[in-house]
């Protein structure tokens, strides 16, 4: 589906009802009790955005759980996916890749949960 079609679909949904966004990605990640290996090593522990590459299954599961709970819009796992924040972990060079992959994971989850009567959207 094209970007313009998605925007039209979003506008239509907003005209019909209130849309619900997902909850906090960081809190959901913390609830998973992940260790250094999940983050790709101790030097990356706490870099939730890096989980997009090291544990995409966890990120997709969080998206799915919010969609199953009724969210209409899910956010990408990109809160700190900027070169400035990622530089703290030596990952500034991965900013573009992390943002693109985070969008891909969220879009895949949203598409899987979408129906003709209830399309799902991605923000981020």
Image (cartoon, rainbow, N blue to C red):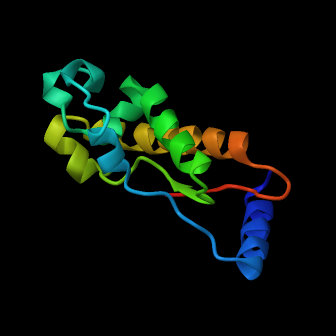
Left or right: 77 with respect to 19?
A: left
Q: Check the image and report above or below for 121 versus 105.
A: below
Q: Check the image and report above or below for 41 versus 98.
A: above
Q: At which x and y percent is residue 52?
A: 41, 34
Q: At which x and y percent is residue 22?
A: 49, 57
Regarding residue 81, the answer to whether it shows in the image is: no
Left or right: 38 with respect to 100?
A: left
The image shows a total of numbered marks equal to 0
Which residue sits at x=28%, y=49%? 83
Q: Check the image and report above or below for 91 versus 38.
A: below
Q: Farthest residue toward the bottom?
A: 15
- Quadrant in the picture for residue 19: bottom right
Which residue occupies the foreground of this view, 72 or 96? 72
Regarding residue 15, the answer to whether it shows in the image is: yes
Q: Check the image and report above or below for 115 versus 102.
A: below
Q: Farthest residue toward the front?
A: 69
Which residue occupies the foreground of this view, 79 or 120? 120
Which residue sits at x=26%, y=40%? 30
Q: At which x and y percent is residue 1?
A: 80, 50
Q: At which x and y percent is residue 77?
A: 42, 46
- Quadrant in the picture for residue 11: bottom right
Which residue sits at x=83%, y=58%? 117
Which residue sits at x=78%, y=66%? 9
């Amino acid at each position: 589906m094209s970007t313009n079609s998605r925007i039209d679909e979003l506008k239509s949904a907003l005209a019909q009802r209130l849309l619900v966004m997902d909850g906090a990605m960081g809190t959901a990640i913390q609830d998973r009790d992940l260790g250094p290996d999940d983050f790709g090593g101790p030097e990356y522990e706490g870099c939730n955005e890096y989980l997009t590459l090291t544990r995409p299954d966890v990120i997709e599961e969080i998206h799915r759980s919010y969609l199953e709970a009724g969210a209409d819009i899910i956010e990408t796992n990109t809160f700190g996916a900027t070169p400035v924040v990622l530089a703290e972990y030596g990952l500034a060079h991965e900013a573009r890749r992390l943002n693109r992959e985070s969008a891909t994971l969220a879009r895949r989850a949203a598409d899987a949960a979408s129906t003709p009567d209830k399309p799902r959207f991605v923000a981020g």
